[in-house]
């Protein structure tokens, strides 16, 4: 009997997140940005108290997370009914008495609180968390610690009454610490993989919120409308704000009733290495600097080389904006579930209907077109070679990262295996790249061995 293979002729598997979720978050963010931009006018119109100035500070950036997450949660619950999906691990008909689950909940809380304490200790020990942009993230987490501690008690006590198996990853870690019940070491590893991801990337995402938000609130589009470089880069920054805001929500809102919980973290060391190489502090060591000898800011070099060619500058600015829009769209498609190194369901709509890795493809294409590493003003003939080589290394890291993510998802979900196979045959970008790679792959001569005597 032949092994079962996914039916690649079938329709593309349905996405676990509907397009309406991300669009609701995008609409909420847009409303908040417009409120912040027009706050002085609103103060005058309605006689509101407070400063007569645009709301562009760090706290306004944090408030943007609320305006982004609440519409997405509402659509997820009211339209998509995600709380009733089997993947949540919840059966709302159980309604166990509190006396039946409270001991399990207490063990789980011990595991959660110990995890949070360990992450806080790592923050204190790692010097980079107390310098530059991370100072804001540490301030936010410091004020969030007590509410998290207090609210975790009623949340866990309530949810465990409805969970089909309340002894989850956190419970196993709590059981390890208390030493009163048997625990599964594999579950403890899953617990720590999930929380290391939340701790590392959550702090990073919070730290980069304020600058982009401030720029979006204060940019004067009228003044730069005739300048392709300034207008193009302003719109690129606005699209990056979309990515950062929705991405930060994804790391913070990992609640099981929203079916947005982390089901597993990437178990492959290669996946972690590839991902961490793309973020501070590892990406800040300068080993892969691909802009040596280029004029000005690395991702604005195109403006230098196209100066005086207005039509070409407009075309190039539009191209860079389109690539950034695809990158932001890839994050919007995740809705509440954006996160690195995690499995939280399968996304098959939006740009993921064309390629399995739209964000990586768009981001790397953007870098090549904006940096132009092969054009330098230093006069050195080695700089362009080195720059192109190191940017190729960066692109290679993202290819490696994509492959490790696929390894993780292919091992977790039959739906992803179906999606992976479908895209290989029907994906507008993926299928064509696959065919191109097949053509470029070297084929050596066929070696014929002499028949061996039968034994």
Image: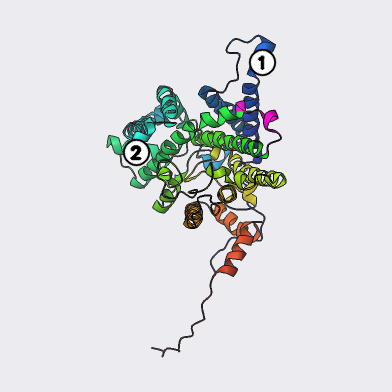
Residue at 64%, 47% in the rendered image: 306
Visible residue check, residue 8: no
SS at badge 1? helix
Residue 305 location (% of width, % of height) = 61, 48
Say which mark, if any, is on residue 224: none
Q: CA distance from mark 2 to mark 1?
A: 50 Å
- The residue that label 2 is drawn on is 173
Work out which quarter of the rendered image holds the N terminus and state it. Answer: bottom right
Is 175 or 333 nearer to us in this picture? 333
Q: Is residue 249 above or below residue 380?
A: above
Is 256 or 158 nearer to us in this picture? 256
SS at badge 2? helix
- Would residue 331 be found to the left or right of residue 381 on screen? right
Neighbor class of circle 2 (other Cα within 10 Å; few <14, some 14-19, many 20+) is: many
Residue farthest to the bottom, as pictured: 453
Residue 235 location (% of width, % of height) = 64, 36
Q: Is residue 147 above or below residue 269?
A: above
Visible residue check, residue 209: yes
Quadrant in the rendering for residue 116 = top left
Region rendered in magenta? 217-227
Neighbor class of circle 1 (other Cα within 10 Å; few <14, some 14-19, many 20+) is: some
Quadrant in the rendering for residue 178 = top left
Name the image colouring: rainbow
Residue 273 location (% of width, % of height) = 41, 50
Residue farthest to the front, as pictured: 379
Please tell me whether mark 2 or mark 1 is closer to you in this view.
1
Q: Any magenta on residue 427?
A: no
- The residue that label 1 is drawn on is 42
């Amino acid at each position: 009997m032949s092994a079962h293979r996914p039916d690649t002729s079938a329709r593309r598997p349905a996405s676990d997140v509907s397009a309406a979720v991300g669009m609701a978050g995008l609409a909420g963010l847009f409303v908040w940005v417009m409120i912040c931009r027009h706050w002085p006018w609103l103060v005058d119109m309605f006689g509101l108290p407070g400063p007569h100035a645009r709301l562009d500070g760090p706290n306004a950036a944090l408030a943007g997370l609320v305006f982004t997450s609440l519409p997405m949660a509402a659509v997820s619950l009211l339209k998509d009914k995600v709380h009733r999906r089997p993947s949540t691990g919840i059966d709302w008909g159980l309604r166990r008495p509190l006396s039946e689950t409270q001991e399990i909940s207490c063990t789980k809380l011990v595991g959660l609180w110990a995890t949070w304490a360990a992450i806080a200790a790592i923050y204190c020990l790692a010097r980079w968390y107390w310098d530059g942009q991370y100072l804001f993230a540490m301030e936010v987490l410091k004020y969030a610690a007590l509410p998290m501690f207090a609210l975790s008690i009623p949340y866990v006590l309530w949810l465990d009454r409805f969970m089909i198996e309340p002894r989850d990853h956190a419970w196993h870690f709590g059981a390890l610490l208390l030493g009163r019940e048997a625990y599964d070491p594999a579950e403890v590893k899953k617990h720590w993989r999930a929380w290391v991801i939340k701790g590392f990337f959550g702090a990073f995402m919070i730290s980069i919120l304020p600058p982009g938000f401030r720029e979006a609130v204060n940019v004067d589009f009228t003044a730069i409308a005739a300048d392709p470089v300034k207008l193009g880069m302003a719109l690129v920054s606005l699209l990056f704000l979309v990515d950062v805001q929705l991405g930060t929500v994804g790391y913070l809102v990992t609640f099981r009733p929203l079916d947005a919980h982390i089901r597993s973290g990437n178990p492959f060391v290669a996946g972690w290495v590839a991902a961490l190489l793309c973020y501070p502090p590892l990406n800040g060591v300068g080993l892969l600097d691909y802009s040596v000898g280029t004029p000005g800011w690395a991702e604005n070099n195109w403006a230098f080389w196209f100066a005086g060619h207005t039509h070409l500058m407009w075309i190039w600015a539009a191209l860079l904006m389109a690539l950034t829009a695809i990158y932001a769209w890839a994050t919007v498609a995740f809705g509440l579930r954006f996160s690195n190194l995690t499995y939280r369901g399968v996304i098959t709509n939006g740009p993921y209907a064309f390629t399995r890795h739209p964000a990586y493809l768009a981001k790397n294409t953007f870098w090549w077109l904006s940096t132009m590493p092969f054009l330098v003003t230093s006069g050195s003939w080695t700089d362009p070679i080195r720059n192109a080589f190191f940017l190729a290394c960066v692109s290679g890291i993202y290819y490696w990262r994509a492959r490790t993510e696929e390894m993780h998802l292919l091992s977790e979900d039959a739906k992803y295996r179906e999606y992976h196979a479908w895209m290989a045959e029907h994906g507008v970008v993926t299928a064509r790249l696959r065919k191109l790679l097949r053509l470029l792959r070297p084929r050596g001569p066929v070696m014929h061995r002499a028949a061996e005597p039968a034994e």
